[in-house]
């Protein structure tokens, strides 16, 4: 969708937790005027240091227990299971950052990479439309 007129507000993207129009972005209880946004970008998710440490420690413990053999194999499998659980329970979020005259502000975050791309594209379209 493209804006047809600078006087009318047109919805470019809308989901249950974010809305982008030709004049504003509403996300997380915050409203941003498109006219004040100079750029938008996505920060790719990174695993936290704590989760990396937990996965590493559980994997090392599991490997060591397997080498020991015997009854330790069951506990080793539990350690590997804990490492896998730590990996998959990470809250890896794509963060959308807006740049304004006041600096950068994290406006929105989602675990859905496609949704993050769609939001960034919508905000970029609103900026170009001259909101």
Image: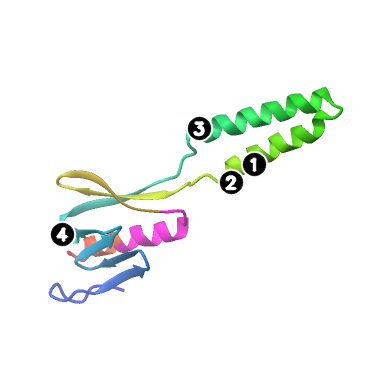
- Disc 2 to disc 3, C-alpha distance: 13 Å
* Mark 1 burial class by Cα count in 10 Å: few <14, some 14-19, many 20+: some
Which residue sits at x=42%, y=50%? 94
71 up-or-down from 107: above or below:
above
Q: Percent x, y for residue 12?
A: 30, 70
Which residue position is annotated with label 2? Answer: 88
Which residue sits at x=37%, y=68%? 15
Query: Are the residues flagged by discs 1 and 2 in contact, CB closer than 8 Å?
Result: yes
SS for callout 1 = helix
User: Horizontally, is 26 left or right of 45 in the view?
Assistant: left
Which residue position is annotated with label 1? Answer: 84
Residue interval drawn in magenta: 110-122
Please identify the dominant SS of the magenta region: helix
- Mark sitting on residue 35: 4
* Mark 2 burial class by Cα count in 10 Å: few <14, some 14-19, many 20+: few
- Disc 1 to disc 3, C-alpha distance: 14 Å
Query: Are the residues flagged by discs 4 and 2 in contact, CB closer than 8 Å?
Result: no
- Disc 4 to disc 3, C-alpha distance: 39 Å
- Disc 1 to disc 2, C-alpha distance: 6 Å
* Mark 3 burial class by Cα count in 10 Å: few <14, some 14-19, many 20+: few
């Amino acid at each position: 969708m493209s804006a047809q007129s600078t006087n009318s507000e047109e919805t470019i993207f809308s989901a249950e937790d974010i809305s982008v129009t030709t004049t504003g972005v509403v996300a997380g209880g915050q409203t941003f005027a498109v006219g004040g946004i100079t750029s938008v970008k996505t920060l790719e998710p990174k695993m936290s240091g704590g989760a990396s440490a937990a996965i590493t420690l559980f994997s090392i413990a599991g490997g060591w227990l397997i080498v020991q053999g015997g009854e330790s194999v069951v506990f080793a499998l539990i350690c590997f299971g804990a490492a896998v659980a730590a990996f998959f329970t990470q809250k890896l979020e794509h963060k959308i950052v807006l740049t304004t005259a006041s600096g950068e502000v994290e406006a929105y975050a989602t675990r859905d990479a496609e949704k993050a791309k769609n939001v960034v594209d919508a905000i970029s379209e609103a900026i170009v439309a001259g909101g």
